Amino acid sequence: MDKIGVLIVDDSALVRQTLREILSSDEGIEVIGAASDPYAAARKMLEIVPDVITLDIEMPQMDGLTFLQKIMSQHPVPVVICSSLTEKGSASALKAMELGAAEIITKPKLGTKQFFEEAKIKICDAVKAASKVKANKLTQLRQPEPKLSADVILEKSNCKAMIQTTEKVIVVGASTGGTEALRVFLEDMPMYSPGIVIVQHMPENFTAAFAKRLDSLCRITVKEAENGDAVLRGQALIAPGNHHLLLKRSGARYYVEVKDGPLVSRHRPSVDVLFRSAARYAGSNAIGIIMTGMGDDGAKGLLELKQAGAYTIAQDEKTSVVFGMPQEAIKLGASAIVLPLHSISRHLVKTKII
């Protein structure tokens, strides 16, 4: 199997070296070069075209956003944004996603061995996910521990959910390509829509800016979830990066729990965790939707939702940036229906499921 060739573009020599060490530790990835600025990167790309570029945003001579626009207009290559955990960095990284970047990762830094191993998983998986992306479609390791299931956060329930109410709740999971997919889905949702709870694979401190951006575009309210937030009609809650999000229920009231814990299906937040909690506490009152993304996070959880009586939807291959998560769910028989992205919200309204 050919290795994924990666070009690192960052003005920090320490970041370049750290990324090189992390990426080279994965036998499926090869660092084919490193550049301190976009001009040096462009010269290297004349010699060899990478499969994936990791790109800093704030650099001298030419900023990363300008370089990204040039890449996408002249020779589209999947780009992973490597950004700092700052308010400015978050806004710029989200702008980069709009311009066609495939993934966001946070700049690697020193920490505990466990922290470093988790960072290695996230960074290598982001590069692998980006390598599966057709870059022009965006413009329209060694595992330190076993791959964990949702069992480590919430045990699977053998009983049915609480008594059915008339109140529905929508749970959504997405990864690579999900930032724009969620925008399309949420912009189409009516003001009276049931409460929505979302897991989008995204680093810590980026989800607040993402939620704020969506809130400015949609008829419904969108916010980053906080522990204990009520799930309300006309509102979407997005899991905060680096924390699991669970749906809970007290009587007829749904609310969310923000929880720490290990990576589940190689992610935190994990779609499987959200979907399992919805299967337990909402059951047939739930609508589960799995969208574009690399890997299989959410596939088993969607099956649990379906088995609990929920209505389940998978995004189709044609409109998925990466047909990984939906495909795995479909293989398991977890989806009741497979739909193009633009049809999901309309289907829910037209069929009076919501």
Image (spheres, rainbow, N blue to C red):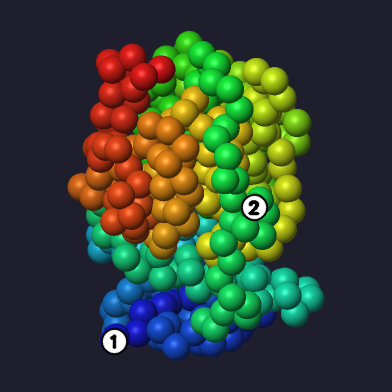
Tell me which numbered mark, 1 or 2, is placed earlier along the sequence.
1
- Above or below: residue 201 compared with residue 113: above
- Indicate the secondary structure of the residue bearing disc 1: loop
Q: Residue at x 72, y 42 (%)?
A: 258
Q: Is residue 197 visible?
A: no
Residue type at mark 1 is: Met
Report x, y in % for residue 20: 55, 83
* Mark 1 closeness class: few <14, some 14–19, many ≥20 residues within 10 Å: few
Number of the front mark, 1 or 2:
2
Secondary structure at numbered mark 2: loop
Q: CA distance from mark 1 to mark 2?
A: 38 Å
- The residue most toward the left is 318
Q: Which mark is residue 155?
A: 2
Residue at numbered disc 1: 1
Three-letter residue code for mark 2:
Glu
In percent of width and height, residue 238 lies at 59, 37
**Mark 1–mark 2 CB contact (< 8 Å):** no
- The residue depicted at 59 percent of the width and 50 percent of the height is 156
Q: Is residue 126 above or below residue 101?
A: below
